[in-house]
Image (cartoon, helix red, strand yellow):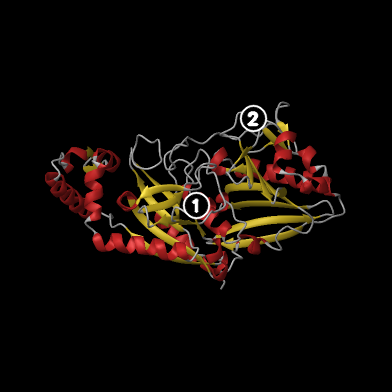
Amino acid sequence: MKRIVCALLSAVALSGAAVAAVAAELDPLLGTGRELWKMSGEAVLRSIPDTFIWMDQAKSRLRFNARTSRAKLSLYGRNVQEAIFDVRNGQVVALSVSVYNRGDAGDIEKKPFEAMLDELRDKIQADVGANLRPQSQNASVSGSRLRSQVWRTGRGDVVLRWSLSRGQPEYIAVDFYPPGKAPRSLKDAIKTSVGSSELEEKVKTDPDGSRYMLLPMVDQGAKGYCVAATVERVLRYYGSNIDQHVIAKLAQSDSERGTNINKIVDVLEGSQSKLGIRFRQLYRYELDNFNDLKKIVKEYNSVARRMDSRKIDLDDYLFVLGRSRYLDFGRLMKSLDFKVFREVRMEEKRDCREFLEMVRENVDNGIPLCWSTFIIPGVGDTDSSEFGMHMRIITGYNEKTGEIIFSDSWGAGHEKKKLKNEDAWGITVNLVSLEPRRK
């Protein structure tokens, strides 16, 4: 089980040194040209043993990540942070290699970043031939510049992508496609292509009453990118080719502290046309200031008295720093009895009813929901012993059992999980829909 998303491992320093000889290499596979696009995922596993794992139970994506693997992997003689093979109908259809990304590797200065970029550009040029000039593609989203160069060859298409703005390097990636299959432009690559009329057919119904969708899986890895990974998965479900590192760039995500929910809301609202989506905030738990918290504690203590449970004294969670008083919100929330807190939330009968109705309506229309929740020890499928915040995806419901069906962006085994309606409502903080603009 992965640790939860919003307070994770510290960033790892990126090494500019050459890859150690013991690292597995991607280059021999790429050198086979057209043969790579005839390979199965299992053939990739045999060719580069003990390096990749399936990201989902459907075996549609193979992933290597340097922070979560004991193995090392190289491309063009350099250690890579992540590599993902996309597999469709049993065959490899794309390979995306993250040579550098800030979330996994930590911050680096502009000069070594540009040196790395120049080195990769030279290696790709040498590989495809000196006479083939790349096509430059750029896009601007939410004030951030995204850049790429594309080489189209008879063996396959190669795309070099990067982002560096205001002197802050974000990522360098190299993508490989079968001949003629690279996106026509960077703008097309990040924009959704599936229309809303195509979504209902994506909804599955099981004999037990479950109605749900299966979204492309993304593993956020050992970093606080739950929001970025969630948005990537929803946009990929709609046909976008965006990745979590682009989202992290736009939302200014932090690998340890995660993403400010207000920032991602601003980004998505302001980028609806360029991403090909309609943004709607369906629900937001009002917890904006100290007065909101005092009200919740008062309601909690009223229910606790009725349930013969321990009451909360807000003063126990205040501390003084300098001349100011602060609240230890995490310690306060961790101390709550979830049964009592859930009962407090259930008294919001109208909001709870509307929440469940919105879930059913959107799922029936094939629209997944970005679901921001509290992480409370002992509630749901998490091994966390600490209170936290997390974003996951509501993908379905079951009226017979009274359950919400959801997915976490933690890789295989987290595609379809269930939580009782009352528990799901008890931990809900935000509910957002991203719908495709195309009809």
Give neighbour class at mark 2: few <14, some 14-19, many 20+ (Cα, 10 Å).
some
- Judging by the rendered image, the residue that carries numbered circle 1 is 230
Query: In the drawing, does residue 439 fall left or right of residue 183?
Result: left
Instruction: Give percent across and percent down for residue 52.
Output: 65, 36
Residue 182 vs 53, above or below: the answer is below
Q: Position of residue 171 (x, y in %)?
A: 61, 47
Report whether 390 appears left or right of 177.
left
Asked which quadrant contains residue 184, the reply is bottom right
User: Which disc number belongs to residue 71?
Assistant: 2
**Amino acid, disc 2:** Ala
- Residue 268 is left or right of residue 383, and the answer is right
Q: Position of residue 433 (x, y in %)?
A: 45, 62
Q: What is the count of numbered marks?
A: 2
The amino acid marked with disc number 1 is Thr
Q: CA distance from mark 2 to mark 1?
A: 27 Å
Identify the residue at image location x=21%, y=39%: 317
Please, what secondary structure does the residue beneath circle 2 have? loop
Pick the residue in front: 165 or 40.
40
**Is 343 drawn above or below residue 379 in the view shown?**
below
Which residue is at the front of the view, 189 or 282? 282
Q: Residue at x 75, y 35 (%)?
A: 47
The one of 134 and 292 positioned closer to us in this rendering: 292
- Residue 66 x/y as whole percent: 60, 35
Instruction: Answer yes or no: is residue 18 visible.
Output: no
| Residue found 29% across the figure and 59% down from its top | 352
